[in-house]
Image: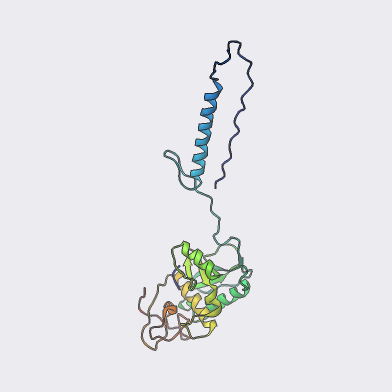
């Protein structure tokens, strides 16, 4: 688990107006009409204007002109191809309450509402991040949010995380901006390095990635036979620790370890 054109319109040009024949014209004599240079100048000005507009649309411009940035969507998660869970719930925990949404990629066979209930249940568990008394979470279906949990296919996770410079190789999750991307493969099959239940592995995914959101870095194994920290990259191996999905034990003790890469 890793911490993860402008279409130019051509202006109408004036048509040449018909002119009366010049009685002084003689056969075989060429005549330079004053309309021709005017059309050439107009054409050059039009091409120049179109060039500046086109470059400006890409955040570039010629010397002496200011680039015009392309418009961006108001919310990166509000794009086609994902379904937002339509349920909201009261906050859990205390202290800083972070509002979150849950989204699921269309066509992957996963219910967004069901996933949202599971994510909230994990964060509401007394072994999760609410135990420290400083963090709380609220599931919302609309309005402002602090982060979004997105469950997506491995290819989609690779594409979006890769665009942010994070290599997920079709296997792991990532944290990009305000979005936590959960690899569907990990959500539905668990990990070969984690012998616990699928429910516990889902808890590990959420606790690990949300842990990053609230400021926790990676941690290592504290010693052979001890619970692996939730902030440990357990998909890379346990280093002698026992698999564990939760940042706290049932008595409220933090299950941490030394700082990791």
Instruction: Work out which residue is located at the far bottom of the displayed protein and give it.
Output: 225
**Which residue is at the front of the view, 190 or 14?**
14
Q: Residue 85: x, y in percent?
A: 62, 69
Which image quarter holds the C terminus? bottom left
Identify the residue shown where x is 62% and y is 27%.
15
Q: Residue 182: x, y in percent?
A: 52, 72
Colour approach in the figure? rainbow
Which image quarter holds the N terminus? bottom left
Q: Residue 158: x, y in percent?
A: 50, 67
Q: Quadrant of residue 121?
A: bottom right
Q: Is residue 82 visible to the viewer in this orientation of the structure?
A: yes
**Which residue is at the front of the view, 166 or 225?**
166
Q: Is residue 178 visible to the viewer in this orientation of the structure?
A: no
Tell me how many marks there are: 0
Q: Residue 20: x, y in percent?
A: 64, 16
In the rendered image of this protein, does residue 186 appear above or below residue 39?
A: below
Instruction: Work out which residue is located at the far top of the displayed protein and give it.
Output: 24
**Which residue is at the front of the view, 36 or 206?**
36
């Amino acid at each position: 688990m890793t911490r993860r054109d402008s279409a130019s319109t051509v202006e109408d040009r004036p048509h040449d107006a018909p002119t009366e024949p010049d009685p002084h014209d003689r056969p075989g004599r060429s005549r330079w009409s004053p309309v021709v240079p005017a059309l050439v100048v107009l054409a050059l000005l039009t091409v120049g204007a179109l060039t500046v507009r086109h470059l400006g649309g890409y955040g570039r411009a010629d010397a002496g002109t200011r680039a015009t940035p392309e418009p961006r969507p108001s919310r990166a998660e509000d794009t086609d191809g994902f379904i937002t869970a339509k349920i909201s719930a009261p906050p859990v925990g205390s202290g800083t309450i972070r509002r979150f949404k849950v989204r699921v990629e269309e066509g992957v066979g996963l219910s967004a509402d069901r996933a949202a209930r599971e994510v909230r249940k994990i964060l509401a568990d007394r072994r999760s991040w609410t135990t420290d008394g400083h963090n709380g979470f609220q599931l919302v279906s609309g309005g402002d949010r602090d982060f979004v949990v997105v469950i997506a296919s491995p290819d989609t996770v690779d594409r979006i995380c890769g665009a942010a410079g994070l290599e997920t190789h079709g296997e792991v999750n990532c944290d990009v901006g305000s979005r936590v991307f959960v690899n569907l493969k990990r959500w539905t099959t668990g990990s070969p390095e984690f012998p616990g239940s699928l429910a516990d592995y889902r808890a590990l995914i959420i606790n690990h990635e949300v842990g990053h959101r609230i400021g926790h870095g990676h941690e290592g194994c504290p010693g052979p036979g001890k619970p692996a920290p939730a902030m440990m990259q357990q998909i890379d191996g346990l280093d002698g620790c026992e698999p564990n999905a939760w940042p706290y034990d049932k008595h409220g003790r933090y299950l941490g370890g030394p700082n990791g890469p």
